[in-house]
Image (tube, helix red, strand yellow):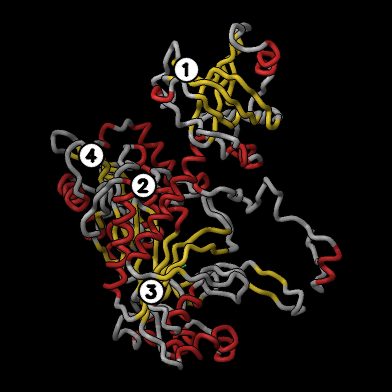
Amino acid sequence: MYRSHTCGELRASHINKEVTLAGWVQKSRDKGFIVWVDLRDRYGITQLVFDEERTPKAMMEKAQNLGREFVIQVTGTVIERASKNPNIPTGDIEILVSELTVLNEALLPPFTIEDKTDGGEDIRMKYRYLDIRRNPVKNSLIFRHKVTQEVRNYLSKEGFIEVETPYLIKSTPEGARDFVVPSRMNQGQFYALPQSPQTFKQLLMVGGMDKYFQIVKCFRDEDLRADRQPEFTQIDCEMAFVEQEDILNAFEGLTRHLLKEVNGVEIDQFPRMLYDDAMRLYGNDKPDIRFGMEFGELNEVAQHKDFGVFNSAELVVGIAVPGGNAYTRKEIDQLIDWVKRPQVGALGMVYCRCNDDGTYKSSVDKFYDQDDLAKWAEATGAKAGDLICVLSGDKNKVRAQLSALRMELAERLGLRNPTEFAPLWVMDFPLLEWDEETERYHAMHHPFTSPKPGQLELLATNPGEVKANAYDLVLNGNEIGGGSIRIHDKKTQALMFDYLGFTEEEAKAQFGFLMNAFEYGAPPHGGLAFGLDRLVAILGGQETIRDFIAFPKNNAGRDVMIDAPAPIDNKQLEELSLKLNLKS
Ligand code: ASP
């Protein structure tokens, strides 16, 4: 028996008991005549004591030579501590050691195994197994376990069946590049790793599974923006014989359950917002509604004066920054520089101070009088003491820019409280999205998403206007889930592929299996998928997902611990009939 108790378990009630513990040496303090060692395992820390009077000399020496992170086993008696430590649950006791076994020595770790470590991100990733010993990472992984358990509990209770789908498949169109795997047995042919189990879960519906879920890895070979992982986890779900309302209710239920069980937060009905309204009011399809600062469109009140910049803009739009009139000129100039950074891309920013006495002072006073500015204040909901920030230009760009500014200001004003949760559904997304690069329409969600009833005809005349039966679940300014009601008949699906620019042959070659299945009695169905990594991070009150993933990749998609990706040897290449054609 390696241990009778864990290092987080012993209390005053155990005093005089003989116990055996095993764990890692967190640290030791050697006063010469007395040595204290903090012994750590997953459950906590227990103090060990060796002293000249009661510990045999050989063991005393052994204790003095224990290094950080040595793995040891001790047997001893639980005794009351002379000076108690109220900061840890085991702080009333210590173990007077009678037997000490070094189970394994350890090199000095390259960073301190403390809550606040001296190790930078790179070194911690390289030695992730040491990083996982630290409380912040350990607790994040335990937190993730709790969330996934609750997901499984809830969905199982609601009659969902967890079904595994394959990883070695053919391309699934979720809008990213595929990771591919060469097939040795089928030379010159490749599997694609699933960007999501989309087509399989639809086939499960045709197979009569009715209510499916899976906690599943998905793979997308995208350029990695901050906080994206090439492999990530979804809670993937699908239901048959449902309408949009049924799906929203089912997964609002799941989210409410998680907020309650994991965070102790009870939330009633989630608000719902149309995509068009989200874009108009927040410039963003995943608005953070924990705070206001809604957009006020100013075209009507700010155009047709003599200010050419506004007159030539497709959209003039502003937000009121609460208390922003207190900003100095220098601070406002810094804000202007901030929106002009290439990452945001605004050409400039007009502002208007709302003075306490009810007057206004703008950066464009030459063109606008007090009455005009009062209308700006009305449109943006600005009050005395606020600052109105106004951007103008191309509608889509300007919305994105002002949305970035809104989030930045909210962050600075402390309005993004991580312990407050504001979920909402964003609904009726456009079916298609124009892609500047390829000059074509793409499916905004994926090609299996159905248009709103009666809108199919619009495809021919006004494709950009067609709305889809598609919805996203948004939490604190993050998309945590998204899905749609699917097309379930072959004719509509073929039409959709046609609009997306697939020839009949291409559609058949890529998705013939699905179209065929639709001819064998496909039930109406729909579903959604949650991004589990992000969901867990947000519920855990954090914005970055990395600490909630045991072995994450870095920004270049590398696992620096195992050093992957890596070349394969010539024999492997030969077996696969592959030849490299490296560019550099
Ligand atoms: N497969 C979709 C995705 O990964 C989710 C869904 O439509 O259910 O975003």
Residue 360 to residue 300: above or below: above
Residue type, mark 3 in image: Lys
Marks 2 and 1, how far apart in space?
A: 54 Å
> Which x, y percent locates residue 4?
53, 33
Viewer-nearest of labels 4 and 3? 3
Give the side of residue 43 with respect to residue 86, left or right.
right
Residue that appears at 47% across and 53% down: 533
Q: Which residue is mark 4?
A: 386
Q: Which mark sits nearer the N-terminus, 2 or 4? A: 4
Beta carbon at label 4 within 8 Å of ligand 1: no
Marks 2 and 4, how far apart in space?
A: 17 Å
> Which x, y percent locates residue 520?
45, 92
Q: Which dot marks residue 191?
A: none
Q: Which residue is mark 2?
A: 407
Q: Which mark sits nearer the N-terminus, 3 or 1? A: 1
Give the side of residue 132 with respect to residue 524, left or right.
right
Residue 160 visible in image: yes
Marks 2 and 3, how far apart in space?
A: 37 Å
Viewer-nearest of labels 3 and 1? 1
Q: Which residue is mark 1?
A: 79
Residue 318 visible in image: no
Query: Local crowd at mark 2 within 10 Å, few (<14), some, or many (≥20)?
Result: some
Q: Which residue is mark 3?
A: 211
Residue that appears at 54% across and 74% down: 172
Residue type, mark 2 in image: Met
Residue type, mark 4 in image: Asp
Residue type, mark 1 in image: Ile
Residue that appears at 82% across and 71% down: 575
Q: Which mark sits nearer the N-terminus, 4 or 3? A: 3
- Classify mark 2: helix, strand or loop: helix
